[in-house]
């Protein structure tokens, strides 16, 4: 599908819900609103919503020669290195926290489940994608301070223990767009569907560290997040 240009419109008020803002780079405070207070359910109608910028073209990478072993003993084979840029990889839907999330334990991961923690993903584009989606689902099961302490790189230590991702209402996955992939880093825009069917795309960066995919917490605390009008330019992927 053809890409859409981001909207130039801005919110009329800095403290309006991120769901009501058609194009925005989150400030540190708004990031914490997303991950600590949950996605806000109130939406003020707005038009011309855009999408996060595509920073690099998705590409197919050669297969890794062997499966790296993490400190926890994860040895899931890397498998196919084809970037799922046009259709989702084969997976079934499981439940993590309050969200339905795609999983493929024997192929892409998670190969290990320990309570709310879903870890051990394949060293592949599809493994990174499933790791990113399972990460956000875990945000409905544990406080952000626990989530980022365990599964993120570079997260500040003073996030506190606040509300979970779905504390303001139900959230489910709707789709994704693969922006870039290398064997060490992946970037995808994950689309959430919130109350009243509103769609929110959040750029999620993942890094391959210690034999698994981890969330790469932005150094400036400002990942791109935008309300989008529909899934044009994204791969639809949901359990509904």
Image: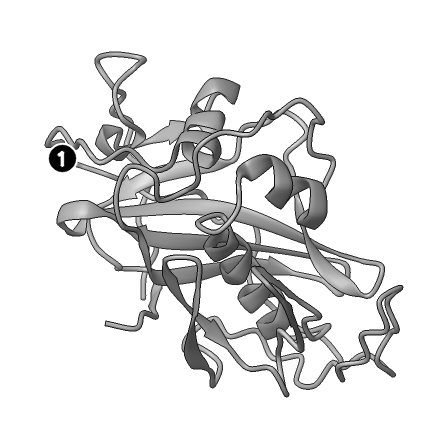
Quadrant for residue 12, please give it: top left
Snapshot colouring = one colour
159 or 109: nearer the viewer: 159
34 or 187: nearer the viewer: 34
Q: Is residue 55 visible?
A: no
Quadrant of image for the C terminus:
bottom left
Residue 12 as seen in the image, left or right of residue 71: left
Measured as percent of width and height from the top left, residue 57 is found at: 55, 59
Q: Residue at x 70, y 47 (%)?
A: 150
Residue 227 as seen in the image, left or right of residue 162: left
Query: Compared with residue 233, is residue 239 higher up or lower down, i.e. above or below?
Result: below
10 or 172: nearer the viewer: 172
Instruction: For mark 1, give the secondary structure.
Output: loop
Quadrant for residue 16, please give it: top left
Q: Residue at x 36, y 54 (%)?
A: 191
Measured as percent of width and height from the top left, residue 208 is found at: 76, 59
Measured as percent of width and height from the top left, residue 173 is found at: 35, 60
Query: Compared with residue 88, is residue 106 higher up or lower down, i.e. above or below?
Result: below
Query: Compared with residue 178, is residue 127 higher up or lower down, i.e. above or below?
Result: below
Residue 222 as seen in the image, left or right of residue 102: right
Q: Residue at x 43, y 54 (%)?
A: 190
Quadrant for residue 24, please give it: top left
Q: Residue at x 51, y 54 (%)?
A: 138
- Alpha-carbon neighbours of circle 1 within 10 Å: few (<14), some, or many (≥20)? few
Query: Compared with residue 212, is residue 41 higher up or lower down, i.e. above or below?
Result: above
Measured as percent of width and height from the top left, residue 234 is found at: 35, 62
Question: Which residue is under mark 1?
Answer: 47
- Residue at the front extreme? 115
How many numbered markers are drawn? 1
Quadrant of image for the N terminus:
bottom left
Residue 38 as seen in the image, left or right of residue 129: left
Q: Is residue 236 visible?
A: yes
């Amino acid at each position: 599908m053809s890409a859409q240009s981001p909207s130039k419109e801005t919110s009329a008020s800095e403290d309006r819900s991120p769901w009501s803002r058609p194009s925005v780079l989150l400030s540190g405070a708004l990031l914490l609103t997303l991950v600590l207070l949950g996605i806000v359910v109130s939406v003020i109608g707005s038009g011309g919503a855009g999408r996060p910028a595509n920073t690099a073209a998705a590409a197919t990478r050669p297969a890794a020669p062997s499966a790296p072993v993490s400190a926890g003993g994860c040895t899931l084979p890397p498998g196919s290195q084809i970037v799922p840029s046009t259709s989702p990889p084969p997976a079934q839907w499981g439940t993590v926290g309050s969200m339905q999330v795609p999983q493929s334990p024997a192929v892409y991961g998670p190969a290990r489940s320990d309570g709310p923690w879903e870890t051990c993903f394949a060293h592949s584009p599809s493994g990174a994608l499933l790791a990113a989606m399972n990460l956000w689902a875990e945000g409905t099961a544990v406080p952000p301070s626990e989530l980022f302490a365990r599964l993120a790189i570079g997260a500040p230590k003073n996030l506190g223990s606040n509300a979970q991702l779905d504390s303001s209402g139900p959230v489910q996955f709707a789709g994704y767009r693969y922006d870039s992939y290398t064997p060490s880093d992946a970037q995808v825009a994950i689309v959430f569907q919130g109350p009243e069917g509103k769609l929110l795309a959040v750029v999620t960066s993942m890094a391959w560290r210690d034999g698994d995919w981890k969330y790469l917490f932005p150094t400036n605390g400002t990942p791109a997040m935008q309300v989008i009008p529909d899934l044009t330019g994204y791969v639809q992927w949901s359990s509904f």
